[in-house]
Amino acid sequence: MNRAPKRLPPEAAAVAADALRHLEALRDAGVLEVPPAETRVRPASAPSPRTVAPAATPSTPPTSTSTSRPAAAYSLSDKGCGSEGLLAVRQELGECTRCKLHAGRTRLVFGVGSPKAELLFVGEGPGADEDLQGEPFVGKAGQLLTRMIEAMGFRREEVHIANVVKCRPPGNRDPEPDEIEACEPFLKAQIAAIGPRVIVALGRFAVQTLLRDGTPISRQRGRWREYQGVRCMPTFHPAYLLRNPAEKGKAWDDLKLVMKEFGKTPPGR
Ligand code: SF4
């Protein structure tokens, strides 16, 4: 794909660059055809009432001595803490040592994005890049996720992204049951604080853990489910899509169902 001509005026070059990025995002998300402009994405419909009442703190997390960092050390400007509700969850989590994953982490990865996002993506847990940067989905898989989000007609900043566990499992192994049990209450509290309309569960582990359903993801994807009273769409993890690009079309089909929920019309229809 050719880059924007160098001699364009700055404003035109910026528009061309934006358009190029959007087309690349569509291509990476598996979109093969883009129709004329008049049939492209329509404005989103008015949001429907949220299904989860805001709640500031987890219902079950331990409140013991396991936090060592003073609560005052966190602020609304920290990643994933953009509202009083999310900040309360972050303060409760502290520099958590509630499970053995704390021992190997560089940074606890709480979440990122809009504190009032209507769309929440949930993955399994931080990888190496995320562990270093303290932000979910920032490596190659994260870059693909960002392009998928943009292909859906959203910006990364207006959705929210989190994981089932907030510390990197060693060697990127699956989190173990005791680790999930210790950490999932904080994900539930995040969801309650954000109040999303839709959750997209990314990958086998997140799908099977959130939905308590061991059915292979190939049979769960693309079918609406529910988690914590919120509509939940299971789909493939971006890392899997990087390894299996032929499956991108199926993931795009799943995301189109989510777009429909928001009144967005996918390109190519
Ligand atoms: S994975 Fe969750 S419960 Fe375990 S130490 Fe990290 S924040 Fe605490």
Image (tube, helix red, strand yellow):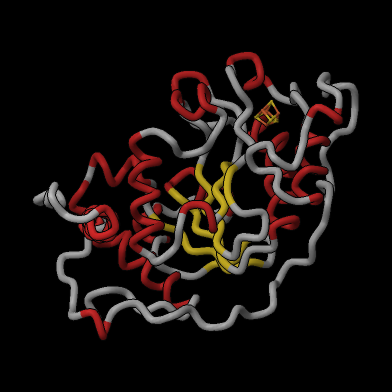
Farthest residue toward the right?
64
In this image, 176 relative to 265: left or right?
right
Report the residue at 72% width, 34% height from top: 182
Q: Nearer the viewer, residue 28 or 157?
A: 157
Farthest residue toward the top?
103
Name the image quarter holding residue 191.
bottom right
Where residue 93 appears, x then y in whole percent? 77, 33
Report the residue at 85% width, 30% height from top: 71
Where residue 44 appears, x then y in whole percent? 48, 78
Report the residue at 78% width, 43% height from top: 87
Residue 38 lies, with reference to residue 120, above or below; the image says: below
Residue 86 lies, with reference to residue 175, above or below; the image says: below
In this image, 151 relative to 187: left or right?
left
Report the residue at 67% width, 54% height from top: 115
Where residue 143 appears, x then y in whole percent? 36, 42
Where residue 195 appears, x then y in whole percent? 69, 63
In this image, 168 relative to 65: left or right?
left
Query: Dividing the image into four equal quarters, which quarter contains ligand 1?
Result: top right
Q: Nearer the viewer, residue 166 or 134?
A: 134
- Image quarter where the C terminus lies is bottom left
Give the number of marks. 0
Residue 249 lies, with reference to residue 1, above or below; the image says: below
Farthest residue toward the left?
2
